[in-house]
Image (spheres, rainbow, N blue to C red):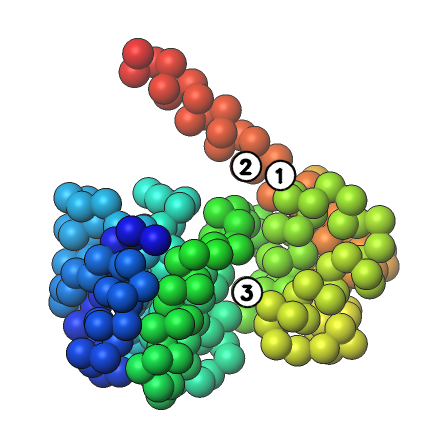
């Protein structure tokens, strides 16, 4: 495997067993303080394929750290070691850029296997954190489960063009599997979220007369995907222009 992993030393579950297991799996380990600024310093001077960040309780500075890391690297695997099982915190970590959330406690061997699997099979799209920020800035309410489901739905639309042909077959099951829930609850949460947008008379870019009728889930996903796609294309064009200017 021959990959490098940086681990925050606040991780109470870390032990010589975990370090030994990971080393045997071909992963080179470095440790540092779990402080956000220390992580950024380490990442800026050394290439790492993955990092493990710990969170004991909700901490906005950790979410900010995840977004910073994701903004400078789409490829690094971010693994969260959580000492709280709160679903909302896990969801915010994923939206902020984490690839994998491991809720402690777990056995050293299980921890090693999950870290290795996450680094070896990085399934998360690099768009996820960007999508969340785009939708937030566009006016989509954040503090609802439907928001997290919507972000994943948009990610699927951008990476799998045919996903919208049947959201019940191509989108709900993927969200349900990733978020450890059922297709029915995904559909219901997104329908509830659409209702909230309608009740709040939320104004969304490029959408006229949002108060006319409540959006169906398919309409909501389509609108959000168009907004995210436009913003991502604009950002890429601006980035390409800056590269040309620097040359």
Name the spot of residue 23 as percent of width and height, x first. 24, 65
Assess whether mark 2 and mark 3 are in contact (beta carbons under 8 angstroms). Answer: no
Determine whether the residue tagged by mark 3 lies in a helix, strand or loop.
loop
Determine whether the residue tagged by mark 2 lies in a helix, strand or loop.
helix
| Left or right of 202 in this view: 139 | left
Name the spot of residue 207 as percent of width and height, x first. 73, 44
Assess whether mark 1 and mark 2 are in contact (beta carbons under 8 angstroms). Answer: yes
Crowd band around label 3 with a 10 angstrom C-alpha radius: few (<14), some (14–19), many (20+): some
At 82% from the left and 63% from the top, the residue drawn is: 168
Up-down: is 65 above or below 115? above
At 73% from the left and 66% from the top, the residue drawn is: 173
76 or 237: nearer the viewer? 76
Single out the residue that lies furthest toward the front: 24
What quarter of the picture does the C terminus occupy?
A: top left
Mark 1 or mark 3: which comes first in sequence?
Answer: 3
Inspect this view and state whether residue 239 appears. Answer: yes
Looking at the rendered structure, which numbered label has been put on residue 142? 3
Q: Give the spatial CA distance, label 2 vs label 1.
A: 5 Å
Q: Which residue is mark 2?
A: 232
Q: Give the spatial CA distance, label 3 vs label 2.
A: 19 Å
Looking at the rendered structure, which numbered label has been put on residue 229? 1
Name the spot of residue 181 as percent of width and height, x first. 66, 78
Name the spot of residue 245 as percent of width and height, x first. 34, 13
At 22% from the left and 58% from the top, the residue drawn is: 28
Mark 3 or mark 2: which comes first in sequence?
Answer: 3
Q: Give the spatial CA distance, label 1 vs label 3.
A: 19 Å
> Which of label 3 and label 2 is nearer to you?
2
Up-down: is 238 above or below 163? above
Crowd band around label 2 with a 10 angstrom C-alpha radius: few (<14), some (14–19), many (20+): some
């Amino acid at each position: 495997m021959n990959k490098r992993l940086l681990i925050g030393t606040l991780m109470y579950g870390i032990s010589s067993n975990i370090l030994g297991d990971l080393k045997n799996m071909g992963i080179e380990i470095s440790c540092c303080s779990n402080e956000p600024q220390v992580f950024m310093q380490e990442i800026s001077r050394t290439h790492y394929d993955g990092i493990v960040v710990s969170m004991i309780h909700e901490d906005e500075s950790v979410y900010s750290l995840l977004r910073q890391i994701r903004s400078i690297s789409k490829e690094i695997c971010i693994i969260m070691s959580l000492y709280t099982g709160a679903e909302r915190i896990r969801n915010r970590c994923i939206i902020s850029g984490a690839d994998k959330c491991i809720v402690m406690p777990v056995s050293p061997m299980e921890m090693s296997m999950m870290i290795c699997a996450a680094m070896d099979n990085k399934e998360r799209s690099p768009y996820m954190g960007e999508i969340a920020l785009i939708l937030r800035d566009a006016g989509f309410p954040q503090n609802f489960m439907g928001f997290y489901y919507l972000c994943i739905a948009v990610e699927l639309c951008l990476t799998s063009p045919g996903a919208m042909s049947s959201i019940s077959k191509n989108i709900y099951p993927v969200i349900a599997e990733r978020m450890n829930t059922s297709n029915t609850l995904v559909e219901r949460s997104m329908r509830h979220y659409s209702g909230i947008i309608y009740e709040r008379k939320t104004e969304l870019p490029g959408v006229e007369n949002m108060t006319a009728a409540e959006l169906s889930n398919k309409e909501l996903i389509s609108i959000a995907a168009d907004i995210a796609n436009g913003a991502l294309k604009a950002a890429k064009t601006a980035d390409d222009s800056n590269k040309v200017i620097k040359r």
